[in-house]
Amino acid sequence: MTPSIAVRASFIAIAAALAAPAFAALDIGDPVPKFTATAALGGKTFRYSLADALAKGPVVVYFFPAADSRDCSLEAHAFAEAIDQFAALGATVIGVSADDIDTLAKFSVKSCQSRFPVASDESKTVIEGFDALMQTRPDFANRLSYVITPNGKVAYFYQNLNPDKHVERMLNAVRALPKATAAR
C-alpha cells in the first residue's frame, strides 16, 4: 500500500468507528451487576438493593449526569409523573448518579417529588458496571436507561443525552414484557 492509500484507509477506519453508534456494554439478555448503594427517597437515606427490588418485579435503572442540572431535573420530574404507570405494570424505578448522597437527598424531594429513589455512586462502581460512564466527561454518568427483568437480565436499554424519550421508551419496554414477568 502506498502511503496515501494507507493514510486514506486509516482515515476511513477511524471515521467509520466514530460514526458508529455507541451501545451499552450490557446488551439485551445480558445479566446485570447486582448492587447495593446508599439512596434517598423523600429526603431520607436508606440502603437500596437491586436484588431486593428485582424480587418484586422489573426495575428501571436510569443513570443521569448530575442532580439539579436542567436536563436531569426534567428527566427526574418526568419519571416522577409516570411512577404510577410503572407501578401499575409492576415495575419500580431507581435513578443513579455520581452525586453525593446529601445532594441526592435534596434532589429526591425537589425533582423526584419523593416518588422514587435515587442512589449515590461516588466511586462509579455501579456506573462502570452498567457501562454508563460518560466517555467525554468521566466524572459523570451518561444518560442511559435500562429495563431489568426479575431474573436480573437486560430487557431493553436506551442511551441519549436528551432526556425527552427516556420515560416513554422505558414505559413502552415495561409494557412489552411478558405478563408473567411484569406481574411478578
Image (cartoon, grey):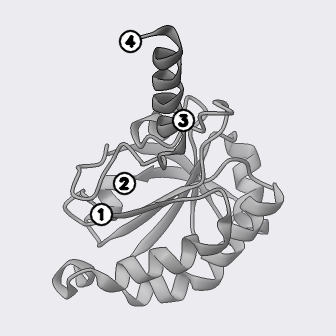
Q: Nearer the viewer, mark 2 or mark 3?
A: 3
Q: What residue do we see at 36% from left, 54% from top?
A: 50
10 Å crowding of disc 4: few (<14), some (14-19), many (20+):
few
The mark nearer the N terminus, 4 or 1, is 4
Could you say where residue 130 lies in the image, as x and y percent from the top left? 41, 43
**Residue farthest front in this picture:** 2
Left or right, 65 with reference to 177: right
Q: Mark 4 is on which residue type?
A: Met
Which of discs 1 and 3 lies nearer the camera? The answer is 3
The C terminus appears in which quarter of the rendering?
bottom left
Q: Which of disc 3 and disc 1 is earlier in sequence?
A: 3
- The residue shown at (45%, 39%) is 126
Pointer 3: what residue? 15
Locate residue 55: give its quadrant: bottom left
Of badges 4 and 3, the one in the foreground is 4
Residue corresponding to mark 2: 50
Q: CA distance from mark 4 to mark 1?
A: 55 Å
Query: Mark 3: which secondary structure?
Result: helix
Whether residue 93 is visible:
yes
Q: Amino acid at mark 1?
A: Leu
Gap between marks 4 and 2, in whole Å?
54 Å
Residue holding disc 1: 54
| Label 2 SS | helix
> In the rendered structure, which amino acid carries the disc numbered 2?
Leu
Residue topped by disc 4: 1
Say what secondary structure mark 1 lies in: helix
Mark 4 and mark 2 lie on one chain; the one further toward the N terminus is 4
Of the residues under marks 4 and 3, which one precedes in the sequence? 4
Label 4, label 3: how many angstroms apart (C-alpha)? 19 Å
